[in-house]
Amino acid sequence: MAFQNVFTHAVSSNPHNLEANHAPSFVSSNCIIQLPSGSTILDTSNVRFPDGNLHHFSSTACSNGNAPTISWDWVEYASKNYGDGSVSGFTYLADQWTVPHDPTNQQNNVIFLFNSLQWFNPQGSWIIQPVLGWGCLNPLCTAGGHYWSLTDAVVFQSYDGSPFNPAYESGAPSTAWGHTIQGTISWQSYTNQCGEPMYQISETDVTTGAQTVLNFCTDTLGMQADPGVLEVYNIASCDEYPSASSVGTVFQNIQSTPSVGTLGNWDSFYDSGVSPQCSYGASPTFDGGAVYLYWNSGTGGGGGGCIALNTPILTSHGYRPVQSLRTGDIIIGYDLAAGRTEPVKVLSNTVTWESSLININDGALLLTATDQPIYASSSTFTGWVRDPQSLKVGESIYNVFDQRWVPIYNIQAISERTMVYDLVTSGPNDFIANGYLLDTK
């Protein structure tokens, strides 16, 4: 989990005009130290464990060996700079993202997805980050492996003039595809365990409740907030990224203090010089509430009708977001001839990207502009409308849940790169999205 200060890819965003100096992987001393969750890092060398005992670390404690050989690190990310790091800076950053599929090709590839805060000056820096990682989290693989896991990290580089530059890591509880991850970094102006201000870094698997926490005592404030980062090592081919059914991830429900609304939207970057090139990209939504990072996505649209990320799909246990549905899951369809709902099986749920969407009734549905049939009615027609862009204000769409026709009062064309899902079912080949009847083409 490397530094990526603003120097390399975002010099124009660097308010301090610091000399370009891309920080190395992990730390220059390649020292990775595992800590129990709940530990409090007092400074670069001293850590209080959750049992209250104080532990002193030096370079001899680096039992996990050297950090991975750098092939590259931050491939794509979003960020914003604010403050001087002493009296002003970021005091809060939180967002959520979904665990992607495992890579198809599982070698020595290491993949990190995280949000982070960074502090830096010409003499040193730190980065704090709740990390979702795939692959070995250290060279001896005492944490991590060929599965997704959670770990919090506090990484130093010449902090407070110290020659000892450790990377402290907690965790790592395992997680799995489709789980929701919450990463939170929060600052407190004074804490008893530190006797000074403190950041708490926490990462939670919202699906299972598993959590890992680190505390970091510091009187400095994060000057760069990164709501979404893809960092990788040892990638030799594009199939070593999460599999083709995962063409990226979305960091969403982003909250920061100060808010991005007061600072201007997130700046986004991707490295066009890495090899192999795997159709990388990064983009924030217009309101800064989400950041899309993608790979293996090509340069075109979705190639068919789809529904947007987070669309609620009706199942026998209530609504679930479309991205959480797996092949074999049972959801609710509707038999038009019989006029009743019935269970149907998910045959596939393919994710891709689309840049042309239709927003119906202020977000009731967000669909691709073409090839996503929706059951609709006008003064002269009742049936399936294949292209949502053909719908007009005054026509109606059918709400199965309420068993009524709902007038369309607003239709808006959206030109924003968005992750979308092509859901295919058995039975009547339809499904219920936020109450409305859609067909699987």
Image (cartoon, rainbow, N blue to C red):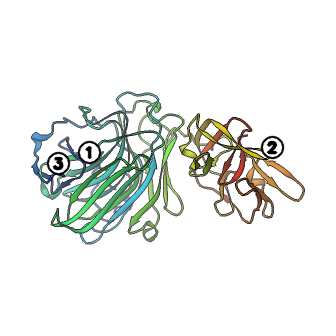
Q: Which element carries disc 3, helix, strand or loop?
A: loop
Q: Earlier in the sequence, mark 3 or mark 2?
A: 3
Query: Mark 2 packing: few (<14 Cα in 10 Å), some, or many (20+)?
Result: few
Residue ID for mark 1: 24
Q: Which element carries disc 1, helix, strand or loop?
A: loop
Q: Judge from the rendering whether residue 432 lies leftward or rightward of residue 243; answer left or right.
A: right
Residue ID for mark 2: 338
Counting the numbered discs, the total is 3
The amino acid type found where label 1 is placed reads Pro
Q: Earlier in the sequence, mark 3 or mark 1?
A: 1
Q: CA distance from mark 3 to mark 2?
A: 69 Å
Q: Earlier in the sequence, mark 1 or mark 2?
A: 1
Closer mark to the observer between disc 1 and disc 2: 2
The amino acid type found where label 2 is placed reads Ala
Q: Is there CB contact under 8 Å for labels 1 and 2? A: no
Q: Judge from the rendering whether residue 392 lies leftward or rightward of residue 73; answer left or right.
A: right
Q: Quadrant of the C terminus?
A: top right
The residue at 65%/59% (across/down) is 364
Which mark, by number, is residue 165?
3
Query: Residue 394 at x, y = what percent?
Result: 80, 64
State which quadrant residue 403 falls in. Answer: bottom right
**Viewer-closest of 382 and 97:** 382
Q: CA distance from mark 1 to mark 2?
A: 64 Å
Q: Is there CB contact under 8 Å for labels 3 and 2? A: no
